[in-house]
């Protein structure tokens, strides 16, 4: 009987830990930037950038977000990357379009063998200047 109780407790603890881990994955990755997150109708996190927000601040939030990790998973599939990025950000400025152009320019550099896939991933994950397309 004690063995059964012990096994039930172990199973409950296991499921509790799995649930906690899932909860952490769903929450925005950084408390400092949580005010920039919104949730869409199906429960996905959306980054919300105001038009008055500076580009460097948008890049800082983006670097810490799960969105950028999701985009990186699909390198070098630029159509999927762009779609994920478009759907993951609400922005009234031209930041979203500029970043997509930046990703496309990196994609062309990758196709032209000017950069490796690792460099592609690093430049997406840590963009310094999205307007410098050279």
Image (cartoon, grey):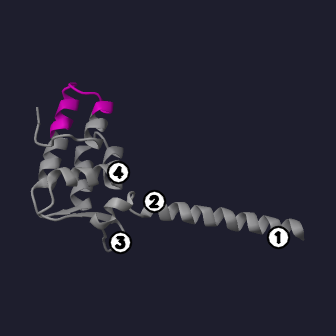
Report crowding for label 2: few under 14, some 14 to 19, many 20 or more residues within 10 A (C-alpha): few
x, y percentage for residue 132? 11, 37
Mark 4 crowd level (few <14, some 14–19, many ≥20, 10 Å Cα): some
Q: Nearer the viewer, mark 3 or mark 2?
A: 2
CA gap, disc 2 and disc 1: 30 Å
Question: How many angstroms separate mark 4 from mark 1 (CA)?
Answer: 41 Å
User: x, y (%) of residue 123?
Assistant: 25, 37
Residue at 16%, 55% in the rendered image: 96
Q: Which of marks 4 and 1 is nearer the N terminus?
A: 1
- Mark 3–mark 2 Cα distance, whole angstroms, equals 16 Å
Asked if disc 2 and disc 4 are in contact, CB closer than 8 Å, the reply is no
Q: Label 4, secondary structure: give it.
A: helix
Task: Kindly identify which numbered label has been placed on residue 70.
Answer: 4
Q: Which mark is residue 5?
A: 1
Q: How far apart are marks 2 and 4 (CA)?
A: 12 Å
Specify which label sits upstream in the sequence, 2 or 1. 1
Q: Residue at x 26, y 60 (%)?
A: 88
Q: What stretch of residues is rendered in magenta?
A: 105-119
């Amino acid at each position: 009987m004690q063995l059964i109780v012990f096994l039930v407790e172990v199973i409950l603890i296991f499921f509790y830990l799995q649930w906690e881990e899932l909860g952490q994955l769903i929450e925005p990755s950084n408390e400092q930037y949580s005010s920039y997150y919104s949730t869409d109708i199906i429960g996905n996190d959306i980054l919300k950038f105001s038009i008055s927000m500076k580009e460097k601040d948008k890049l800082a939030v983006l670097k810490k977000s799960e969105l950028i990790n999701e985009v990186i998973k699909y390198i070098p599939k630029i159509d999927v990357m762009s779609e994920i990025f478009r759907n993951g950000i609400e922005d009234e400025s031209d930041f979203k379009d500029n970043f997509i152009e930046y990703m496309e320019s990196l994609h062309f550099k990758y196709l032209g063998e000017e950069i490796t896939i690792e460099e592609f991933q690093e430049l997406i994950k840590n963009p310094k200047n999205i307007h410098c397309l050279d």
